[in-house]
Image (spheres, helix red, strand yellow):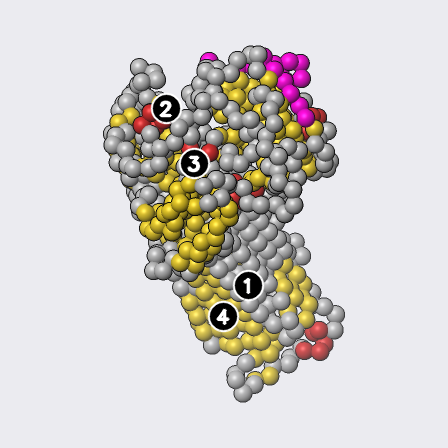
Amino acid sequence: MKKAGLFLVFMGLISMMSSGQTYIPITDNMQIQSNSNIKFIAGEYSFSDAPADGVIQLNNVHDVILDGDSCYVNGLNDQGYMIKIINSDHVVIKNFDSVHDYFYAVHIMNSHHITINGNVFSGNKVDSSGWISIWTDYTQALGGGVLIYQSRSANIYENTMTLQNDGVALYHCDSIRVSENDFSWNTSFGIRMYWTDTCHIYQNNCSHVNRPYTDPSDCAALLMLVSNENVVEYNDLSYSGDGVFLGQYQHSNIPNNNYFGYNECSYSPHNAIEATFADGNTYLHNNCNYSHYGFWLGYSFNTLVDSNEIIGNFQSGIAIDRGFENTITGNIIQDNPTGIELWEGSPITGYSNQYSHDYFIHNNLFDGNTLALSASKTEHLVAIGNAFDFSRDASIFFDGQSDLDTISGNTFRFPTVFHISNNSSYGIYAIDNTWIPGDTSLISEKIFDKYDNPAKGEVHWWPVQPSPEVAAQVEPPCDMAEPPSTWYGYPETGYPAPVKFADSLYFDTEDKMVGEASVKFVTSRGWYVALNYRPSGDSLSVWGLNDEDTLYFWVKTLKFIPYGFQYFQVRIGDREGNYIRYSASANLLNQAHEVWKRYQFPLAGNTTFQRSAVGDMNWNQVNYLEFWADTWDYGFTLWLDGVQFSECDPVTAVSGEPQLSSGLEQNYPNPFINSTTIRFGLTERGHVTLSVTDLFGNVITTLVDQIKDPGEYIVRFHAGDLPAGIYFCYLCTNQRVLVKKMIILD
């Protein structure tokens, strides 16, 4: 029924304006004729459409404009459609202020050249529980804003379609432009595409698409099933079950060739981007951070993953089961339990002949991953020109009879345990790489192969490219919480990572108990985070410890109420991945809230720090020390000081204004465009070189190469005509080598 009074005011009012526009009210079962230009009279309307034939009907018509400015239409019971269009063309629907409580606001079939602009189609059919079957055709559509079937050349832009199952659902369509719409906070899909090709999807907000009472893996900001040749760019697909879900199961013979560029897909509880059984897709400059997986590309092939940001994911940055002929290049892959994970799992019916092979992985930056690149039963993997920094367990890990793999032209820096761990029975060719340090005795200690276990294959890692040689650290320093030690935060495998070292982990010269500084770690995440010590300059620790030794340390924390710390553990490990675990009550960290506490325990363990072993620990080859904490993802701040295996007196901090310790600060600004400032400090006289290199280790310029006295120094670096990308700044002194990552922007 129309709202009271509306019919009396406007009944029979049909005014022909100079523009040819007709002013009429909305009535039930309206049949619109061709060549109509209608401005509906403003007001509130209520129409149920149980027969699902449409309140406003367009059948076999053309050249129609429907303007719903200031019209508010209530469908009452989530049934039917406000507008239904069949076999029509050149139709414009615009400016409706609200259409809600229908199954879909608009249903379009077998039509072309449809424009939908400036409408609010929100609050239609919505479900908040139950599993979604994604492979159903349009007859089982879920309800929402707009449903289009077997149509082409539509333009849907600047609409709001939120708080319902779907924003827009496209079935068997092509050449649709969907742009600048708000499809956020839906419960099934922001945009649903089924056998729909050659569309342009850009600048839409499809964030926060989730079903609150079920596993979010069945919903997505963008769903694409057997949909090809589409361009998807500059969309917000974040905080959704999947940012993108693309599926080709049983249709892998149909090339996809979709392009995904510059989309924000982060913070997805399932996958930022998932594409399965898919061929020929390109992913360029997308953000795929802090999700369960950054990319899940099972059984996908001929894929290009280029220049994406893949940071802090729960499980792996990029995961591919039985994929082949995929190229992964130019990405920042940082702070994931596994950066890239390639393997050959149990075959799926119809795909038993597909196996994991032929990967070209080049020019990526791997930074702070537990395993940077893991390849299990993968053949013909070629890794060229990558930078592997701060890997915890291994920069490259091979397993499961991986064969015919080549590692060349890469730079390996600062692993806790291994540069390369070969657990395959086949040989690995790792030639012409830059290893830091360049001392072959230390490199061999950071390679696991047949010389460590005769059942494994050999890593052929010669020759060594020139790099600074660093001596092994044969005994722990007096205080490991003093510069120039190296500390880094790592996630437990299967848990999300903290933010990176340069942003959250540094030496605090003001809040400390002994010596020059304490180590301060700030993270907004809190799932099983390891605070990891290594000596500076990529030196290898080969400490000799025993049960009679004691670990001493000061600790201070800031915890978030109400939960506080839930887990506390100390680990001491050797270079082969074996370690001793000392499990303690989390109350020890809770008691250190805003106050310094000193703890100690013998390496034999005690009732407070209970000892257990993982593997066969070699006490003469101790390589690292870690402090593990957990706050159930509430984040925390933690300071460490006086970390030592013998009670000794670290250097007392100089009173007065805090000074830069001997070391290299992060350049500022970073990233930068034209120039940046580099600051470093020296505690003794000696020869110093300060140089800038590219990803391959090639020296771009040497900024300092001379004898320097103790003190602080500031150097300006001008990028000149260097291309945008990732570079490294090296400070080499008589004692050590320090490095910082620099990013030049366009």
Helix, strand or loop for disc 1: loop
Residue 237, compared with residue 585, is above or below; it is: below
Q: Secondary structure at mark 4?
A: strand
The residue tagged 2 is: 445
Residue 344 visible in image: no
Please tell me the numbered disc located at residue 729: none
The Cα atoms of the two marked residues, 1 and 2, are separated by 61 Å
Q: Earlier in the sequence, mark 4 or mark 3?
A: 4
The mark closer to the camera, 1 or 2, is: 2
| Gap in angstroms between the C-alphas marked 2 and 4 | 70 Å
Residue with the mark numbered 1: 159
Q: Which residue occupies 39% across, 28% down?
A: 471
Query: Label 3 sits on what residue type?
Result: Arg
Residue 736, label in figure: 3
The reply to whether discs 1 and 4 touch (Cβ–Cβ < 8 Å) is no
**Mark 2 element type:** helix
| Quarter of the C terminus within the rendering | bottom left
Region of the chain picked out in magenta, as a range: 598-617
Q: Which residue is mark 4?
A: 92
- Count the marks: 4
Instruction: Kindly indicate the quadrant of the structure image that contains residue 649.
Output: top right
Horizontal arrangement in the rendering, residue 653 relative to residue 191 (left or right): right
Q: Residues within 10 Å of mark 1 (few under 14, many from 20)?
A: many
- Residue 131: x percent and y percent? 55, 38
Residue occupying the point 48% across, 50% down = 713
For badge 4, the amino acid type reads Val
Q: Pick the quarter of the image with the N terminus.
A: bottom right
Task: Please say if the residues under marks 2 and 3 sit with CB atoms less than 8 Å apart.
Answer: no
Taking the image as drawn, is residue 493 in sight?
A: yes
Query: Residue at point 70% right, 32% down?
Result: 596
The residues tagged by marks 2 and 3 sit, at their Cα atoms, a distance apart of 19 Å
Q: Position of residue 160 (x, y in %)?
A: 57, 61
